[in-house]
Amino acid sequence: MVFIYYCFGGTHSSVVTASLHLGLISNRRIPTKEEILKLPNFDKLVSKHHGRIFFIGRDEKGNKVYTMGCRNKSRITIKALKEIARIYNINIDNVKFINTISCVNLYLRIGGYLSRTMGMVSLGRPLVVYGVRKAFFDFVKLANKIKNDG
Amino acid sequence: MIYHCYGSSHTSVVSAAIHLGYLPDNRIPSRDEILKLPYYDRTKPEEIGSLFFMGVDKEGNEVYIIGMENGKEIVRRAILDFIRIFDIDPDSLYLVDSLKLANLTTKIGGILSRRLHLVTLGRPLTVYGIQKNYMNFVKLVKDVKEQLKLKKG
């Protein structure tokens, strides 16, 4: 299986959920600021990375886990990828696209905008960390659901 | 071989049609010739992002069209990274932006016809816009075919 977690920028909510899927952070307690900032690509990507599909790791079953940011174009992007799969005879049943935007709260939204779009990292980064910590168990729930379904 | 534009209704259809020889490359086609094209000014908003098969060219390349709205950078990157996951050679795919050939007339016509459903008003405008810019479409396709030849060596 291939799991592609996607959100707006591919740098906060999708990274956290993919990391939980892979066990890069504990799902039993809220991670520290340092643990969050150490996650792959966390609060690092900008608009030129949108659409890129980043390999984060393989889970214990050998499934590949990726993240992607597709701004507000997720519907069309996912549709296009499924269409491409069709013409290349890729079995799309083996690919799971997971939208992580449902876990995004206002802190993540504002912090992400400040840090990534405006480049005001010192202002935005603490906000996204706070947002991740606040919504952490929503991310855990989503990652667990995907792993159990998959 | 995929021509992409905003809604896969106008510029991508015309470019693919020239590529496949459905439209002439030495003169401006008539209104009827353009309106007869498959998918021309017909794609619905919810179909944007779907790949439509237009035909196979003389070299055996499959020609498709797709709409990417105003997200072409994102969708293109995603497609290229996606096929790499499955070890497919990105060179087996050629993405061509035809939206850059949409002039103001085609754009306004497209919005009127596709988004606002004012087909009788918008459709003639899209045709007029394409006829006005037609030789640039011919040039785009010519360049694409030369690139394809170079790629294949």
Image (spheres, grey):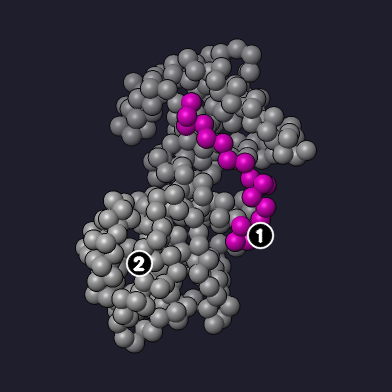
Given residues A20 and B65, the one toward you in this image is: A20
Judge whether A25 appears above or below A105 on screen.
below
Q: CA distance from mark 2 to mark 1?
A: 27 Å
> Who is closer to the viewer here, B27 or A132?
A132
- Element at badge 1? loop
Give the amino acid at mark 1: Asp
| Mark 1 lies on residue | B87
Residue at the image position 53 percent from the left and 78 percent from the top:
A59
Residue ID for mark 2: A13
Above or below, A30 relative to B20: below
Residue furthest to the left in view is A106
- Which residues are the magenta region? B84-101
Residue B5 sits above or below residue B86 on the image = above
* Residue B90 part of the magenta-drawn span: yes
- Same subunit, tags 2 and 1: no
Using a 10 Å C-alpha cutoff, classify the residue at mark 2 as few (fewer than 14 neighbours), some (14 to 19) or many (20 or more): many
Amino acid type of the residue that numbered disc 2 sits on in the rendered structure: Ser
Residue B105: quadrant of the picture: top left
Residue A83 seen in the current view: no
Res B13 seen here: yes
Q: Nearer the viewer, residue B96 or B12?
A: B96
Kindly identify the residue that appears in the image at 67 percent across and 46 percent down.
B91
User: Horizontal and vertical percent for residue B116?
Assistant: 30, 32
Q: In the displayed structure, does residue B134 sit left or right of residue A74? A: right
The answer to whether B108 appears left or right of B149 in the picture is left
Q: Position of residue A148 (x, y in %)?
A: 44, 80
On screen, residue B105 versus residue A118, left or right, reads right
Q: The numbered mark 2 sits on a residue in which chain?
A: A
Q: Which mark is residue A25?
A: none
Q: Quadrant of residue B24?
A: top right
